[in-house]
Image (cartoon, helix red, strand yellow):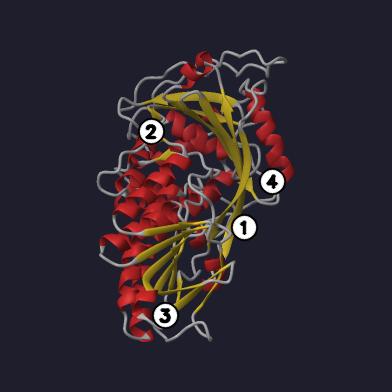
Amino acid sequence: MDSAADVWDVVVVGAGPAGASAAYAAAVAGRRVLLLEKSELPRYKTCGGGIIGPSRDSLPPGFELPLQDRVHAVTFSLDGRFARTRRSRKMLFGLINRPEFDAQLVEHAQKAGAELRTGATVSRVEQHGPAVPDRRTVAVVLADGETVLARAVVGADGSASRIGAHVGVKLGQVDLGLEAEIPVPPSVAEDWKGRVLIDWGPMPGSYGWVFPKGDTLTVGVISARGEGAATKRYMEDFVARLGLSGFEPTISSGHLTRCRTDDSPLSRGRVLVCGDAAGLLEPWTREGISYALRSGRLAGEWAVRVAEAGDAVDARRQALNYAFAIKAGLGVEMAVGRRMLALFERRPGLLHATITGLRPAWNAFADITRGSATLGGMVRSNGMARRALEILDRRMDTSSGVGPAGRGIGQRERSAPEGEDPAEAGEGAVGEVVGGGLAEAPSVVESPKAPEAPEAPKAPEAPKTPEVPEAS
């Protein structure tokens, strides 16, 4: 393998959203790109499948989203209580099934010129040793012993990344997500059409979701790793509370999400990492698709520059430029997300009251999901948002490990006593955060409690959630 024709310009490991985006970006630049994927496509991935504005804006030109539903309403609840629904005339975000979405991204990469190989498991990468012919080359060693040579490698092989281990990715937050795909009859599907549920959960930092996708509901929960038994109980209780226990899931799965530390590397030599492999996701919501698409595109673009580098110094310079691009964009958003997670772990009731009871908070949520704003951008450009976050930081007991730099508390402090509406209990705190005269909070109506789980497989009617005045 001493011919230049045997060396790929860029090899991308992993054909998820991050890897497909990286392969597309490098192939569009006219480079020889090989995309390696260990599974056959399409394949299922544990993921809610929400496509927010930043995800949509990062798709290749001409990409048509295979949307299963368009979300115009969100019901928020606090561990099953105080459910309130907010609605919008404009679509907030879309819902997709990952197998179709991922396969379509790969097709676009192939049309751009990338070559796909499935069933190819990567065991390791080498940048020195007998398998590497020169210092401009990286050896990608497959599980069957085959060696693939490249001028640059992009690791996009998921949260348990082998390429990430080679780079030395450091993780500061690991969470466990459980999810089920539950087919429902038309009567239940119709009630959920266009509306999602977000339930702030019983453990610090936990929450659950219901995402409708035609005749199937994607139902899941997530919480910190180490709370496995409690997370499983939350999932069971959540499904039962929704009246869905009588339906048999077609898929039940679990997945660990891993979030990088601030000082975690994003490259080593001629190897870059992106998406889950780099620990890039939003720490509070653990949203990862938009981070995968955006970081994958950047990784593909900078991998082209690394591949063109004539020596180690130039390759290092291009890799550092990639890291700077990630940290200046996604890194800023992650820093704000960590602060939001710390607040959420400590005061979930306050956040629930704020987002359901104050129009500016709901408008901010809608702007972020649509892609017209980001958490980081709001803090940078909006003085009131910045002051609000600083006030919330001060309200937390940083001596107990809760604050902008940390996560977790021994026991979550509720904002309201049992049975008391958090919107009333948190009124003073919410008023302090938003200040006076911003906007009058719209009236809200408490939703009826979800029905008890059915004893027989008979299709239960999901409860109708009353509307509140529109916040456009």
Circle 2 residue: 67
- Choose between 108 and 161: the one closer to the eye: 108
Circle 4 residue: 411
* Tag in front: 2 or 3: 3
- Please tell me which residue is depicted at 31% across the width and 84% down the height of the picture: 310
Disc 3 element:
loop
* Tag in front: 2 or 4: 2
Which amino acid type is marked by label 1? Gly
Numbered disc total: 4
Disc 4 element:
loop
* Rendered image: mark on residue 401: 1
* Tag in front: 1 or 2: 2
Disc 1 and disc 2: Cα gap in Å? 41 Å
- Please tell me which residue is depicted at 56% across the width and 50% down the height of the picture: 396
Q: Is 199 situated above or below 45?
A: above
Disc 2 and disc 3: Cα gap in Å? 41 Å
The quarter in which the N terminus is drawn is bottom left
Crowd rating for badge 4 (residues with CA inside 10 Å; few <14, some 14–19, many 20+): few
Residue 236 point in image, percent of width and height: 69, 31
Disc 1 and disc 4: Cα gap in Å? 12 Å
Badge 1 or badge 2: first in the primary sequence: 2
Circle 3 residue: 137
Q: Is 271 situated above or below 422?
A: below
Which amino acid type is marked by label 2? Leu
Badge 2 or badge 3: first in the primary sequence: 2
Disc 2 element:
loop
Which amino acid type is marked by label 4? Gln
- Please tell me which residue is depicted at 52% across the width and 50% down the height of the picture: 40
